[in-house]
Amino acid sequence: MIPLYKLENLPRTQKLRKIAKIFTMAENRLSLAADKTMCISNAELIFFADAAKMLTRDTLFSQEARKAFNEAENIFQAAQSPVMIRRALNSIKHILLTETGPDQADWDFTDNNGNLDPMKRQVFEGMQVYMEDIRSPFNVGAMFRTVESFGAEKIILSPFCADPRHRRAERTAMGCIDIIPWERQELFAPGQSIKWPVPVFALETGGIPINEFSFPEKGLLITGSEELGVSPQALAAADASLGRVSIPCYGTKASLNVSTAFGIAMQAWCSAIIHGHKKR
């Protein structure tokens, strides 16, 4: 591993790419190791903390990014759980990759629709979605298109969710980004209390099977990143409210792409709302 003093003296872009590569390799070891408590040494954690501290001093980064670097530094210094260390490595990696400009390897699509009329949408008031750290512009675009199709009122993006205005997100969304209300916002207010007054539930493994889940008429569905899923803090908020909804899988992989799983969950939620209205 490159000494920190040599890292500090590299040109900025080269330095950021080096750190991103080092953090990616460490994250991969954490995800693959059978004993995740043993695959990151104390010396590496000290290096990670020092690198994060160095990034915090880089004023070319946004205030939000530097806040994330500072939080990651604290996680490394405290040698927190492997889950938290991996999330910190993952967050910094993606911030640095965004800063240095390499494209994500997503499929590209052409938008042949455009000019959609928002007045033709059927909207279910109070049906909202929180996208927590969805990294792929392709997935963000696909999820916007799903939200439009199933009548959700609004999308809230976490600060580090991929940009809906990325060309791949816009092409995949096929015009839906222009007609769906959306904003960026933290899920939690200062003090770690969740901001939304409506019931909250998460799309995550280990929850209630989708055919048994009681979907609310109004609520906030949280869906997490492709690599790490919903964060522990958001899961705790969901567990304290409506809980987790899961999609049973029967293959060897036993998992779905996040935008695919999201589409299944949104269709089920929309159907539950419609059938609930018909019963009245």
Image (cartoon, helix red, strand yellow):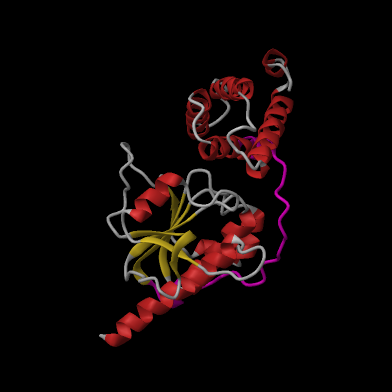
Q: Is residue 46 left or right of residue 109?
A: left
Q: Residue at x 57, y 50 (%)?
A: 163
Residue that lies at the very extreme toward the top in this rendered image = 5
Percent x, y for residue 157? 47, 51
Residue that lies at the very extreme toward the left in this rendered image = 280
Q: Which quadrant of the figure contains the C terminus?
A: bottom left
Q: Which stretch is magenta?
A: 95-123
Q: Residue at x 58, y 63 (%)?
A: 259
Q: Give whichever of 240, 3 is nearer the camera.
A: 240
Q: Is residue 205 left or right of residue 219?
A: right
Q: Give whichever of 238, 56 is nearer the camera.
A: 238
In the rendered image, the vertical position of residue 15 relative to residue 178, given as above or below:
above
Query: Is residue 96 located in the magenta-colored stretch of the structure?
Result: yes
Percent x, y for residue 86? 57, 38
In the rendered image, the vertical position of residue 101 relative to residue 48, given as above or below:
below
In the rendered image, the vertical position of residue 60 relative to residue 210, given as above or below:
above
Residue that lies at the very extreme toward the front in this rendered image = 35
Task: Determine the main secondary structure of the stretch shown in magenta.
Answer: loop
Query: Is residue 162 located in the magenta-colored stretch of the structure?
Result: no
